[in-house]
Amino acid sequence: MPPPVATLCVLVALCLLPGLVQGQPADLEQATKQARRLLDDGKFAEAIPLLVELRKAAPENTSLGMTIGQAYANTGEFQKAILEYDAVRRRLPNFKPAVVSLATLYLNLGRGREGVALLSEFVARNPGDADTRAMLASVYQAQGDLSRANEHLAETARLQPQDPQVWFALYQNLNAIVRECMALTEQADPESAPMVAMAGLERVHLQQDESAFYLLRESLRRNPKLRAVHSQIAAIYKRRDQFQWAKDEESREVALGSPDCGQEVAACAFLAGKYADVMTETRFARIPEDLYWRYRAAVELGNEAFSKLQSLPASVQSHGAQAEWMRKRNRHGEAVKAWQAAIAMAPNNPGLRKELVVSLLQAKEFAQCAQQADALLKDAPEDPELLLLRGDAALNQQNAAQALPFLQRALKAEPGMLPTHASLGRALLQLNRAAEAIPHLEKALPQASDGSVLYQLSQAYQQAGKSTEAAQALARYQEIQRREQKERADFEARFQITPP
C-alpha cells in the first residue's frame, strides 16, 4: 500500500523544503508551503499540480519525485505513480524507497512478476539488505513458492540472528514445506513407503508412540531399505526404557550400509547433517523418495529454528511459536498461557487475541472464551470466525438462545462456512426448532468428521415428523459408531510396541 500521509509530510518537510525554500523566489516559497499544507490535510489531488510545478525548479530532486509518486498512489492514479517511482529508480537503482514503493505498487496491482523482479534485482545488488530480502521472501510465500522463500529467510536469519521475527517466519515456512511434502507425496503415491513413514514421523512429533511405531514398521515392510527409519523406532524403544531393543534396531540401520552418494545425493546430505543441502537438492522434488528426504530436512531445520527462537529473549514470536506447538499436541491449557504471554507483550494485537479465543474454546474455558470474543467483536462486529467462536462458547454452556444470534450473524457474513451450519443446526435443535435446523445440519454433513451431526440430524428429522429420514440417519450414525469401535479395537491390537 502507499505510504501513509505522515510519510509524505516528512518527505516534504525534511527533504523538499530545504532545497526549494531557501534562497528561492517568494512565489516558490509560497507554493511549497501550500503544497505541504495540502498534504498535511490529505488533499493529495490538489497538491499534485503544485508539486509538479515545484519540480521544474528542481527536476533531479529525488524526494520530490517520490512525494509526487506517493501522492498519485494515494489518489488512485497508479500508472502515474509507477512512472514517478520508476523514474527515480532508473536514476538511482540502489535507492531503496523507490524500489520498495514501486515493487509494492506492482504487487498490489496484481503484477507480481514485475514486483518480484524488482526486489530480486535489488537484493542481488545489495545482498546484505535483510529487510528487502525478508520482503521478497514474504512475496514468494504469498505466491506459494516456499522453496525460494526459504532460501531468502534462511539468509535473512544469518544476517539478523537476533531478530525473533525472522526466526519465526523461517519456522513457519519450514512447517509449510513439511505439509507441502506430505501433500505432494499423497498425490504421487498415497500407499508408498515414504508416505507411510511421513505419517509415522508426524505421530512421533506428536508423541503418539504406539501409532508412530506401527506406521514406521509398516513403511519398512513396504520398503525394507528405507533409511533413517530404524533410528526413529530405536528412539521410541529408548523412551520406553527398552535399551537392548533400541540397540538391536540401530544395528539394522547400520546393516543397510552407506548410501551411494553418486545416486542418493539427498540421503547422503541428510545423513551427514547437511540439511540445507538437502533442501537445495530436492527443490523441485515430486517423487515420494525425494520428497521423503525433503520432509526430513525441513523437520530438522524447523526444529533448529524453533530452538533458536526460544533461545532468544522472550518475544511475541517465541510465545506464539510455543502456543502453536502446544495446540498441535492438544495441550490447549498450555497454549492459552503462551498466547496470554504473547498478548502481554503486544496487548493491541487482534490476531493474537483471536488465537487466544480459539485456544480458550479448545481448552473448554467457555466463559473466558465468551468474554474475550465479546471484547474483540466490539471492533470487528461482523467477523464470521469470531461470531462462530462466540456462538460455540454459548452452545457449550448450554445456552442455545444466546448462541443463536451470533451464529446467524456469522452465517450471514460467510454463508459457506460449514462449521457454522453445524453449530446453527445444533442451536436450533436445542431450541425445539427442528424444521429450521434440518437444512443447516444437512449442509454440514460433508465436513463432519464424526457421527455427531448425523445423530443430531436424526433427532431433528424425528422431531419434525420425518420418521423414515430419521431412521436412515440414525442407521448411518450407528454404522459409524460400530466402525469407530472396531477401529479402536484394531488400534489396541495392532499398535503394540513389540521387540525388533
Image (tube, helix red, strand yellow):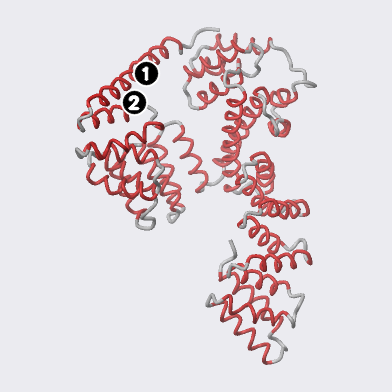
Which callout, 1 or 2, points to the residue nearer the camera? 2
Cα distance, mark 1 to mark 2? 10 Å
Task: Between residue 201 and residue 74, name the one nearer to us.
Answer: 74
Q: Is residue 98 above or below residue 28?
A: above
- The disc placed on residue 183 is none
Q: Where residue 334 sits in the image (x, y, percent)?
A: 40, 37
Where is residue 494? Give x, y as percent.
45, 10
Quarter occupied by the C terminus: top right
Q: Residues within 10 Å of mark 2 (few under 14, many from 20)?
A: some
Question: Foreground: 473 or 401?
Answer: 473
The type of residue carrying mark 2 is: Gly
Q: Which residue is mark 2?
A: 451
Q: Nearer the viewer, residue 78 or 232?
A: 78
* SS category of the residue bearing label 1: helix
| Residue for point 43% across, 54% down | 347
Which residue: 35% across, 54% down? 377
In the shown orientation, is residue 7 left or right of residue 325? right
Picture residue at 54% right of the left edge, 75% below the top: 42
Query: Which quarter of the image is occupied by the N terminus?
Result: bottom right
Looking at marks 1 and 2 on the same chain, the residue that comes earlier in the sequence is marked by: 2
Q: Are marks 1 and 2 in contact (CB under 8 Å)?
A: yes
Residue ID for mark 1: 484
